Amino acid sequence: MPRKKNSKNTSKEEEIVIPQIKSDFKIKKFDLTDKQKNFLKLSLNNKTNIFFISGVAGSAKTFISVLSALELMKVHEELELVYIRSLAESADKSIGALPGSIDEKFDPFLLPLKEKLEELLSPDDIKELLKSQRVTGIPVNFFRGASQNKKVVIVDEAQNMTFNECQTIITRIGKHSKFFFCGDPMQSDIGSKSGFEKMYNIFDSEDAQEWGIHCFEFNEEDIKRSEILKFIIKSLKSHKK
């Protein structure tokens, strides 16, 4: 009898538990501008593959991309959201000087994604998506290698990426994936080294649209963050001109 009991315990220990994927998360409703509504509709189209999104601060580039990704993930359970940022920073310390593992170092760069998730989902739904790894974040340096299949990839702060970095990312696109490049040319930390505008201009064509690649621009009319920011952006644009 003891032998039989031990055998039963062993089988329990060897049992492999596969985490369940929760797809019934609820997305909160938000008022969108007409341009943001058009973007969302186009992003959900099966023929749309890549977006280059240029826009001023506060014009909901990241927000609308995360919203699009979540809407796609509700319909297609196999999809995963991958959030990418460049490690470029304007502070005195580089990421290499920060303590901890790469996950701990990169965690501050994930704050924009976490903020958008908190705006759109409940805490329990966010916890489930992170636990099941349907939502992950990595530095651009770790994106090289295998093709990205069944992924919704959001490339945030793309104005801080070189042309080679943008090229590395876009050439990873695989089957059943959508890529969103979000950039604000007014806020580049690497100046003339930025490759976002050049990549945007390369694919801003009717030929690219036929391949499901779209260039989209948001302006101060699409700013949701605050009314004063609209005035600030208009003033900065006038000064630049």
Image (cartoon, grey):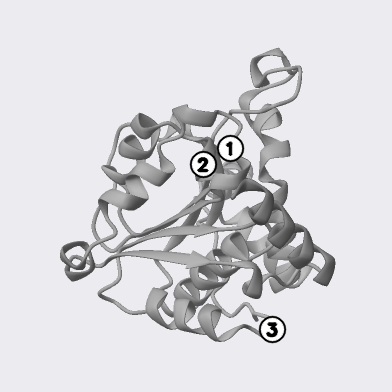
Disc 3 packing (10 Å; few <14; some 14–19; many ≥20): few
Residue 233 percent coordinates (x, y)? 71, 58
Whether 219 is drawn above or below 100: the answer is: below
| Gap between marks 2 and 3 measured at Cα | 27 Å
Residue 159's tag is 2
Residue 203 percent coordinates (x, y)? 27, 55
Residue at (47%, 29%) from the top-left corner? 192
Amino acid type of the residue that numbered disc 1 sits on in the rendered structure:
Ser
Badge 2 vs badge 1, beta-carbon distance below 8 Å: yes
Could you say whether the residue bearing mark 3 is in a helix, strand or loop? loop
Extreme residue in the top direction: 97
Residue at the spot of label 1 = 188
Q: Earlier in the sequence, mark 2 or mark 3?
A: 3
Q: Quadrant of residue 47?
A: bottom left
Viewer-side residue, 180 vs 229: 229
Amino acid type of the residue that numbered disc 3 sits on in the rendered structure:
Phe
Whether residue 21 is visible here, answered yes or no, is no
| Gap between marks 2 and 1 measured at Cα | 5 Å
Residue at the spot of label 3 = 30
Amino acid type of the residue that numbered disc 2 sits on in the rendered structure:
Gln
Q: Quadrant of residue 222?
A: bottom right
Residue at (40%, 37%) from the top-left corner? 195
Residue 216's tag is none
Compared across the picture, whether 96 is left or right of 172 comes to: right
